[in-house]
Amino acid sequence: MHKAAGATTSATWTEAGSLKDVSKDVSTLTVSSGPGLRFVISSAKGGTVTHILPKADIGRLEKALSQVSDALSK
């Protein structure tokens, strides 16, 4: 997440990383940076869903993820 958030200065998308779930429904989450953060979930059964988080909202996302991390570590 930090790698992608730090690279949100380009007008084009650059893949920052991906995770693949190999359960019954093979799915992949790909995160790309560019003019914001792009999250793409691709599923063999469910198709593809894309969400683009504007650069202005990245700080709020990082804060929320930090709060979740803190709550889970207690």
Image (cartoon, rainbow, N blue to C red):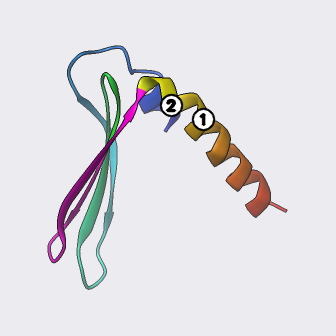
Which residue: 62% across, 47% down? 65
Where 28 falls versus 9 (above or below)? below
Are there few (<14), some (14-19), or many (20+) residues within 10 Å of tag 2?
few
Horizontal relation, residue 9 to residue 74: left or right: left
Indicate the amino acid at tag 2: Asp
Which residue matches tag 2?
A: 57
**Was residue 70 drawn as part of the magenta stretch in this picture?**
no
Marks 1/2: CA–CA distance: 5 Å
Examine the residues drawn in magenta and state their main secondary structure: strand
Residue range corresponding to the magenta coloring: 39-54
Where 37 falls versus 9 (above or below)? below
Find residue 57 and report its horizontal and vertical position in percent.
50, 31
In the structure shown, which secondary structural element does the residue marked by tag 2 occupy?
helix
Are there few (<14), some (14-19), or many (20+) residues within 10 Å of tag 1?
few
Disc sitting over residue 60 in the figure: 1
Tell me the quarter of the picture where residue 42 sits: bottom left
Find residue 43 and report its horizontal and vertical position in percent.
20, 68
